[in-house]
Image (cartoon, grey):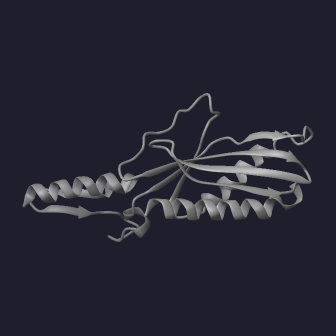
Amino acid sequence: DRRKIHVTIHELKGRLGDYARYIETVKKRGYRFNHPQLDGALPASKLRARLCLVLMPFDDFTRERDKPDLAAGMMLELATTLTKLEHLKVIKGLPHTVQFLPPQEQGESRYLLEGSLVGQSAALKIHIGLLRQSDRSLAWSETFRTSVAELPTVQARIATEVAQAVKVNTN
């Protein structure tokens, strides 16, 4: 029935985000996908429910006064690694006292990633928490023990575990 088709197309456009503009209504015929570069084929990632991760600024409780940007650098490295994942949209959060997040899209699962660094160069603890934005419930958390010298290795491990946790918690 025509009403069901219209509702389905409307829902599809909602899930496609920016790609929705390429679904055209053809008067008295139906709908057409019209994109010059894709030739009618949509990337599979645009058809899946979207995952969104908001990276909150990490708290720095280290005794490294000569390295004031350790927590900021940690967050930027995680953002760089996580943005390479095809199915994940990453938003950089603002300080905890001010939050202006774009509205959650239909079909989107949104998580907040919070963290803190505690200790000193030779003995750092990195606390990471993944929260569901809808109710701020804890979906996953972990503490990583490392040193500043081993930080790049641990950052890659954290990014991998966060990506796995988001995937597991959205099934």
Which quadrant is home to the N terminus? bottom left
Q: Is residue 171 above or below residue 129?
A: below
**Residue 101 in view in this figure:** yes
What's the residue at 26%, 54% (across, down)?
11
> Can you give x and y, in whole percent of width and height, for residue 71 in the image?
77, 44
Any part of residue 87 in sight? no
In this rendering, would 104 be left or right of 92?
left
Q: Is residue 55 above or below residue 65?
A: below
Judge from the rendering whether residue 23 lies leftward or rightward of residue 96; answer left or right: left
The residue lying at 63 percent from left, 63 percent from top is 161
Judged left or right of residue 15, residue 61 is right
Q: Quadrant of the C terminus?
A: bottom left
Furthest residue in direction top, as rendered:
97
Name the spot of residue 169 as percent of width and height, x first: 49, 59
**Residue 68 quadrant:** top right
Residue 98, image quadrant: top right
Near-viewer residue (22 or 170): 170
Q: In which image quadrant can residue 5 be found?
A: bottom left
Residue 64 in the image: x percent, y percent?
A: 90, 42
Residue drawn at 39 percent across, 47 percent down: 105
- Where residue 21 sits: x, y (%)? 32, 53
